[in-house]
Image (spheres, coloured by chain):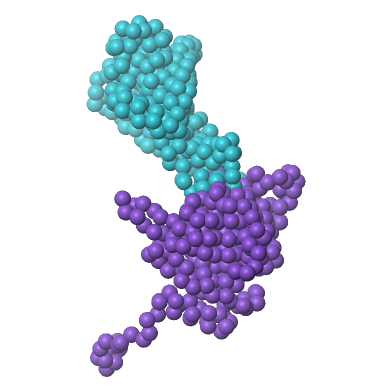
Amino acid sequence: MTDIVSSPISTPSVPWLERVQRVVTAFAIPLAFPAVLVLLWHLASTYELMPEQILPYPAYVWDAAVDAIVGGDLLKQISFSAGRVTAGFIAGAVAGLVLGFAMGFWHWLDDHVRPLFTAISQVPTIGWIPLLMLFLGLGEALKIVIIAKAAFIPIVMNSSAALRSIPPGYLEVARIFRFNKLQRLRLVILPATVPPVFTGIRYGLTKAWTALVAVELLASSEGLGYQLNWARQMFWLDTMIFSMILIGLVGFVMDHILARIEVRLQRWKLTD
Amino acid sequence: MPGSPDPSARPGYLSIRHLNKVFRVNDRRLQALLDINLDVEQGSFVTIVGASGCGKSTLLRIVAGLETGEGTVIHDGKPVEEPSLNRGLVFQEARLFPWLTVEQNVALGLENASADARTRERLVREHLELVSLTDFAKAYPRQLSGGMAQRVAIARGIVNRPGLLLLDEPFGALDAFTRAHLQDELQHIWEHEHLTALLVTHDVDEAVLLGNRVVVMSPRPGRIARVIDIPLAYPRDRRSPDLIYFRNQILDELDVIRGPRPVTGKARDIKVPA
């Protein structure tokens, strides 16, 4: 055949040296910039560009982190926050997927719901806290509803758009082969909607995590957001900075896990 | 065919009678097809050629059952109202599902066939062999070239052995070398697998090379201008001078060539670059 341009998938054995190189580049490149920032931070503290009470040494922040980890306090705060974000995110994601797919399937529903939905989504999550505080009090319900709402919005938007964006050509192939509804769902609609829906889910989780911190800052007596705010009030800047880094890290890890799942679900997109 | 008993009752026969199709575009009526009458006998290879906008693709889509027109379309003794597994369709774009491997894409054609798992596996394997893609069974569509993707689409279209294979400009998006290659492969497949094929193209050479009957269509409104039988044996060689005779007839009919054009300017005025 003359038109063969690519060869079948093959995984040639990689020499160990090349593998080491790969690991180095996988970690060295993303970590280089943070390392430079920490160095600048250290220099700024050393030359006292800012008073130590405001900008503590990186080493102090590290010590605060070690203390929190050893004392077990950190695990407690993380588990509080993680429990809330899990409950809220699952509630928001399920509701978001149901409404999003329903809006994608039924145009009349979309016509009725979308204007209100768009208006609601324009009010930032924090803007909902005062009203919901009156309805739900300061308890767990408030936090979970706020987190669920934050995850809900991007998931609805992406899953409703996903159904509309299935190439009509694929649905014609399904007609030619006389697929029934189930076959159409299994072979065309679900695989075609996985990428945009998953993008919505990832974005929803990021939003949920951000909302968690916001609601914990305003109305909570435990969790990472609370720890951050409390450390500021006590002027424990090392704990405060450490909390911020931790919030970022947890969010990064969660997004990374979802990204891995995403790759698994769409292997066809990434093979070479 | 006057005189003979109704041919549309014959098995595998496609009969189109007084087919019209009108599109409505912004309150304007657009006659896409005007009084189309066409017969395709079992085992034949009919090609439809015409300029873009002559309704040839619309005609094919009606035969496939993807669209409806006014008039009668009968295939294999039954009126065509919707798609049927007895009619395969290969589109201009391969339209492979990117989330399925090559063999899974071919197996789509057997999704609703009454064959057990082992038979399906065998049929998929045989058809991948037929289009010389056995080595690519586990590859994903994005790893294929355009020509390879189109061969998968052909395998998917015939794996269920439809009584009629419809091809809608199947090689229109390919480069000239790949196209020539696939045309020869299609001749071979059609001959050896005893298919009945109806192919739409805007490529006159392709229509003449492949068809034992060429239907020439003209646009606005889309209608059949002429039907030319080509009684040449298969496999045909594209270099054969016999094909030129038929090709010229079609070009005349399509009014593509308007004779030698008057030369403007004089030869001595043209400066040859040093």
Task: Return the residue nearer the eye: B65 or A237.
Answer: B65
Residue at the front extreme?
B3
* Quadrant of the rendered image containing residue B12: bottom right
Task: Return the residue nearer the eye: B234 or A161.
Answer: B234
- Residue B91 seen in the current view: no
- Total marks in image: 0
Q: Could you say where residue A242 lies in the image, as x and y percent from the top left? A: 38, 20
Q: Is residue A78 left or right of residue A227?
A: right
Q: Could you say where residue B60 lies in the image, as x and y percent from the top left? A: 51, 58
- Residue at 49 percent across and 60 percent down: it is B18
* Quadrant of the rendered image containing residue A112: top left
Quarter of the image that includes the N terminus of chain A = bottom right
Chain (cyan): A
Q: Could you say where residue B145 lies in the image, as x and y percent from the top left? A: 54, 59
| Residue A272 against residue B40 in the figure, above or below | above
| Residue B235 against residue B61 in the figure, above or below | below
Task: Return the residue nearer the eye: A245 or A272.
Answer: A272
Chain B as rendered: colour: purple
| Residue B178 against residue A46 in the figure, above or below | below
- Residue at 39 percent across and 28 percent down: it is A109
- Residue at 41 percent across and 19 percent down: it is A148
Task: Return the residue nearer the eye: B238 or A250.
Answer: B238
- Residue at 65 percent across and 74 percent down: it is B235
- Residue B66 seen in the current view: yes
Q: Is residue A194 left or right of residue A123?
A: right
